[in-house]
Amino acid sequence: MTRTSAQELSNTELVGTIEQIATIISESHYVVGMTGAGMSVESGIPPFRGADGLWTKYGVPRMDGYSEFKKDPIGWWNRRTNEKIDAHIVELRDALTSAKPHAGHYALVGLEKQGYLQSLVTQNIDALDEKAGLENLVEIHGNRTKLRCIDCGDRVSLGDFVPLYAPDSCIKCDGIVKFDTVMFGEPIPSDVMVAARTEIDKADCVLAIGTSATVRPASGLLWIAEAAGATIIEINPIETKLSPICEVSLRSTAGEALPLLLQSLSD
């Protein structure tokens, strides 16, 4: 296993580690990426945990958001329009509104177009992967720019529109409609979980980028892949719970490492 820190490496050594990752990817048959909050931080979206995390600033929110929504969906939507909305949600919403894809997102698009990346499973809700142009994408925690029926799972894209009032019932089944993003206490939608597991089961290499590997059930997919014999590669500025099972663990940001990886594979 290789452990490298971008702060400790010379440019030559950094390029050497990138080339090592490129070799593994080029020799793999099915590469799946998995991104976490670290990917979004580079676009100006604050994390939940850590020194600058929203929960550190405002406190950990209640974990029963989904059950409260189901009790009174219209009331929940109405509360979004006034000052009762949680402060951490306001800050997150403002950051998501102004965020744009960074060089790392576009490098993933390049890897996909060149056939080196078969799919991406993301834990992020910011829709930046989609905006950058990724096509084979599984958004395990949902997408903030979509609505979803909690009964039949039908999704509607909102684009930049943000509803101010409760949306109408689902046109397909008359079910309750909410944002596609998964709330605290809400199960991962079954279609999404099946899609993510299907991709992981195909993978002989998983590229984990900016994920702390602590949020279940998404993080569990990485250990499932490793147990099935897939090679795990990590790109993250800090050591994580995932680091001990990685073949290569590069201490770098996505914005720095992924363009170099794309360049290495393109040469």
Image (cartoon, rainbow, N blue to C red):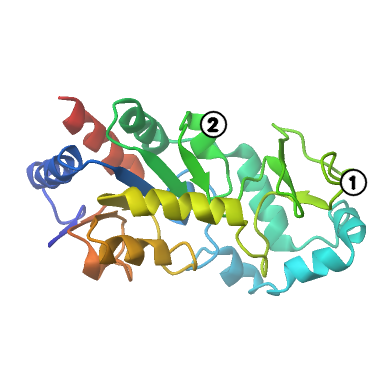
- Which residue carries the number 2 mark? 131
Residue 165's disc is 1
Helix, strand or loop at label 2? It is: helix
**90 sits left or right of 72 in the view:** left
Instruction: Confirm whether residue 58 shows in the render.
Output: yes
Residue under the point 74% across and 68% down: 65
Query: Residue 136, image x and y in percent?
Result: 45, 36
Q: CA distance from mark 1 to mark 2?
A: 26 Å
Query: Residue 151, image x and y in percent?
Result: 77, 54
Residue under the point 58% across and 49% down: 125
Instruction: Confirm whether residue 209 shows in the render.
Output: no
Residue under the point 75% across and 54% down: 150
**12 sits left or right of 197 in the view:** left
Q: Quadrant of the C terminus?
A: top left
Local packing at callout 2 (Cα closer than 10 Å; few below 14, some 14-19, many 20+) is few
Q: Earlier in the sequence, mark 1 or mark 2?
A: 2
Local packing at callout 1 (Cα closer than 10 Å; few below 14, some 14-19, many 20+) is some
